[in-house]
Image (cartoon, helix red, strand yellow):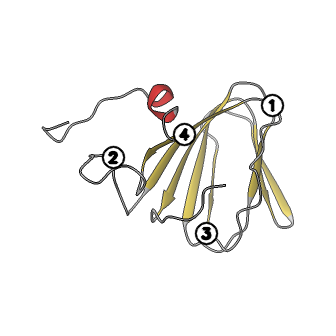
Amino acid sequence: MGDGIYVGRAADDAATDRGWLLGHFKPPGDIRHSEDVEIKWGVHDRGDRRAEWARGETRTALLVLISGRFRLEFPGRDVVLSERGEYCVWARGVDHSWEAEEDGTVVMTVRWPSVPGYAV
């Protein structure tokens, strides 16, 4: 890492920080430390749900389906991603939750900016 390059495996690295690969929560000096953006590699089994709704969100988010089937829940609207590469973007201030609908569902989430205080 001393040369400004990091090579990893998402599945392995994600296991060490609740799925998060990059963001404010990585140690300062680590090339993966960022206050601008967060990236998560999420692997979920059928029925995995967000512990509670995210409310008062101050970040914009993008979630991309890698494999499986994933439901995003928003007030008054659900979005189901079922084909590889489908994605959803939601703005700051949009409350949300989610649920995996198939075993082995994999999603990549990008949020910006990276701010503390959202872990549940």
Q: Residues within 10 Å of mark 3 (few under 14, many from 20)?
A: few
Question: Amino acid type of disc 2?
Answer: Arg
Q: Residues within 10 Å of mark 4 (few under 14, many from 20)?
A: some
Task: Give the mark nearest the N terminus, 3 or 4.
Answer: 4
Question: Amino acid type of disc 3?
Answer: Ala
The residue nearer to you, when weighing 102 against 11, is 11
**Where does the C terminus fall, quadrant-wise?**
bottom right
Q: Secondary structure at mark 3?
A: loop
Task: Give the mark nearest the N terminus, 3 or 2.
Answer: 2
x, y (%) of residue 2?
Answer: 14, 38
Task: Give the mark nearest the N terminus, 1 or 2.
Answer: 2
Q: Secondary structure at mark 2?
A: loop
Q: Are marks 2 and 4 in contact (CB under 8 Å)?
A: no
Q: Secondary structure at mark 4?
A: loop
Residue underneath mark 1: 46
The residue nearer to you, when weighing 72 against 82, is 72
The residue nearer to you, when weighing 118 against 37, is 118
Is 69 positioned to the left or the right of 111 in the image? Answer: right
Looking at the rendering, which quadrant does residue 82 occupy?
top right
Residue underneath mark 2: 32
Q: CA distance from mark 4 to mark 1?
A: 17 Å
Question: Amino acid type of disc 4?
Answer: Gly
x, y (%) of residue 116?
Answer: 50, 64
Residue at point 75% right, 34% down?
A: 69
Q: Are marks 1 and 3 in contact (CB under 8 Å)?
A: no
Q: CA distance from mark 2 to mark 4?
A: 13 Å
Task: Give the mark nearest the N terminus, 1 or 3.
Answer: 1
Residue underneath mark 3: 91
